Amino acid sequence: MATLQLHNITKRFGDTEVIKGIDLEVSDREFVVFVGPSGCGKSTLMRMIAGLESASDGDILIDGQRINDVGPADRGLAMVFQSYALYPHMTVEDNMGFSMRLAGVPKEERRAKVLEAAKILQLEPLLDRKPKALSGGQRQRVAIGRAIVRNPSIFLFDEPLSNLDAALRVQMRIELARLHDELDATMIYVTHDQIEAMTMADKIVVLHDGVVEQVGSPMALYHHPRNRFVAGFIGSPK
Ligand code: ADP
Ligand code: MG
């Protein structure tokens, strides 16, 4: 069970307010997509949810508990970034198990968790390889595997597919949707790609200049965009 609530979340860098009082509810097991142009504040918002950046104002709640002062490792979240640096000298298995090793999880238990994640991601034949012997899509699956082994209640994806070519992006979208079904997890996914948002989301949050322009299902936003900005971004051409 994992719900997320944002109450009046604000972020200032010096005198510049880049997130301007965002309110948002994410339900348990929902697949929510944050969409908006480059620089609108998507990554900053995700980093605040992850605990990598503190909020200047407002409250972040997971399952009703305020977590603003909880450290990133203790929020029950896992984040997958666009630049998913794997450790080049480590095998796939060791890359996937690394956070557990840091946490002192015994070797046998680490191996069991890694195997379970590898099965879900079809990485079993690749566990002994080093990252340089993997394709882009395989590397991205390892990065997702690193998140899965942490058993997060909420996954945060920040443009995880933007370094992949178009065909691979389509395949990975399908794999992420399957993962969402299999893991029963809450997922928040950031993209600036309208098609990704339309095809993957239960709910789309359209961001523009640090504010939420509209929240709704892909169909609701497509057929009933609230304003010209939303229409231009994902609305139907009326
Ligand atoms: P997006 O992910 O939607 O492209 P970001 O969240 O990365 O947008 O950035 C939102 C705004 O905040 C941008 O104007 C960016 O320059 C600014 N910004 C992000 N991080 C910092 C920082 N550490 N210091 C100052 N400004 C920042
Ligand atoms: Mg970003």
Image (tube, rainbow, N blue to C red):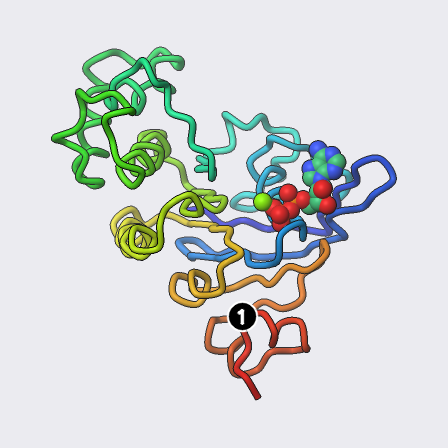
Q: Residue at x 37, y 19 (%)?
A: 87
Q: Name above or below for residue 39 compared with residue 145.
A: below
Residue 29 relative to residue 110: left or right: right
Going by the picture, which residue comes out furthest to the right? 15
Q: Secondary structure at mark 1?
A: strand
The percent position of residue 98, horizontal first and vertical second, equals 34, 18
Depth check, front residue: 45 or 57: 45
The percent position of residue 166, horizontal first and vertical second, equals 35, 55
Q: Name above or below for residue 52 compared with residue 186.
A: above
Q: Examine the rendering and report whether any part of residue 58 can be seen.
A: no
Q: Quadrant of residue 114?
A: top left
- Per the image, the residue denoted by label 1 is 216
Ligand 1: which quarter?
A: top right
Q: Assess disc 1: are there few (<14), some (14-19) or many (≥20) residues with their C-alpha within 10 Å of its C-alpha.
A: some
Residue 43 relative to residue 98: left or right: right
Q: Residue at x 50, y 53 (%)?
A: 191
Q: Residue at x 58, y 67 (%)?
A: 215
Going by the picture, which residue comes out furthest to the left? 125
Depth check, front residue: 178 or 62: 178
Amino acid type at circle 1 is: Gly
Q: Examine the rendering and report whether any part of residue 184 can be seen.
A: yes
The percent position of residue 11, horizontal first and vertical second, equals 75, 42
Depth check, front residue: 120 or 82: 82
Residue 176 relative to residue 43: left or right: left
Can you tell me whether the CB of the residue at mark 1 lies under 8 Å from the nearest atom of ligand 1? no
| Quarter of the picture holding the C terminus | bottom right
Q: Residue at x 67, y 49 (%)?
A: 39
Number of numbered callouts drawn: 1
The percent position of residue 210, horizontal first and vertical second, equals 72, 53
